[in-house]
Amino acid sequence: MSAGLGFGLISAQRSPGDPRTWTDLYREALDLTALAEQLGYRSVWTTEHHFIDDGYMASLLPMSAAMAARTSTIEIGTGVVLAPLHHPLRLAEDAAAVQLISDGRFTLGLGLGWMPVEFEALGADLKRRGRAMDEILTILPRAWSGRPFTHHGDVFSFPEIGVRPTPETPIPIVIGGGAEPAVRRAARMAQGFFSNASPAKLAEQVAWATDELEKADRDPAGFRWIYYTVMCPGANRESAWERARTHVHAMRWKYGDMEPSANRSGELPHPPPLSDKDEDQLRKATLLGTGADIAEQVAGIQDAVDVDLDIVARSYFPTMTFDEQAEVMQQLAEEVAPLL
């Protein structure tokens, strides 16, 4: 197994002009998961949104169960489930099922969500999402204990019940996000944090978490830091960017197009032309070049913080063909992972 390189974030999105169906893309996502294990990746991660016209993955726990059934050693993680959009008891049941199917290889990553249409359509309150997350993080460990319990909170309330089946090994929870409250919540109530901040911001997040861990009398050494960042290998940084350019642009542009797409029908739109300013920003945020080049950039990120990082290559590009994607995965596994 590689020294900590993970792969994601798998989203099974369709692309303009691509003849592949969602059936094809979900089949390929499972094939890529199996390939990630074969190549020695430590972990593989999915990502959630709802109602997007390109079909951005909405059901992470069923997919995680399928990924677990196709593999035997790799960690399966959600990066992240938008927790306030889910009822905590159903979330607890589904996560327990994934943990059992995976034989203890599941990590539940949770985030708040940010898109108003998702909250409105699914009957959740955007303004109370932080409160909902606090309650969910209280409920989940009790639900997985196997003992009946009750909960009466500001957001969720239910009678005394026992959630079964229960996981046979603990399900670690990591919190994703960027804001200080998310980091501090993770330090108080979870087992780790899932970040893609800039190196300077990451150092600030580590400081917030360390402070909160000390206040909660928790050992910082037991707190996991998972850092995901876009990587694309090549013979040099210039050729790597030429390879990655349109794919990174499409990935980033779609986030701004998500809410407008929720009630859109018809053909998928193409991203607009990439401006020089936006291209410069995207290029600076992408780790590019040979395996040694990328490993050096990862080392710079690691050196900015006083904690060990589990590195995840956010190198799933929906606009790539399966063969192109597999080649990127293989190069990262063979050229970058051994240097981490």
Image (cartoon, helix red, strand yellow):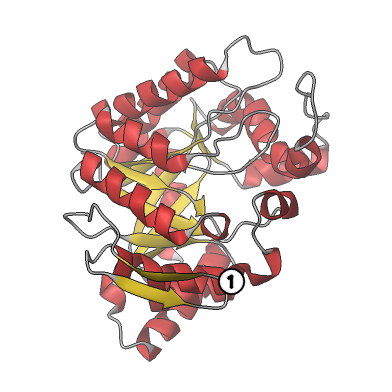
Query: Residue 318's quadrant in the figure?
Result: top right
Q: Is residue 12 visible?
A: yes
Residue 338 in the image: x percent, y percent? 27, 39
Query: Residue 53's quadrant in the figure?
Result: top right
Report the label total.
1
Helix, strand, or loop for circle 1?
helix
288 or 224, nearer to the observer: 224
Q: Residues within 10 Å of mark 1 (few under 14, many from 20)?
A: some
Residue closest to the far front? 159
Residue name at image x 20 percent, y 48 percent: 104
Task: Name the side, left or right, on which 277 lies relative to 107.
Answer: right
From the image, tell me which residue sits under label 1.
130
Residue 240 in the image: x percent, y percent? 55, 28
Quadrant where the image shows the N terminus: top left
10 or 211, nearer to the observer: 10
Residue name at image x 48 percent, y 75 percent: 185
Q: Is residue 203 visible?
A: no
Give the amino acid at mark 1.
Gly
Residue name at image x 79 percent, y 33 percent: 274
Residue 172 in the image: x percent, y percent? 30, 60
Residue 48 in the image: x percent, y percent? 54, 44
| Above/below status of 281 relative to 70 | below
Residue name at image x 49 percent, y 35 percent: 315
| Above/below status of 166 relative to 1 | below
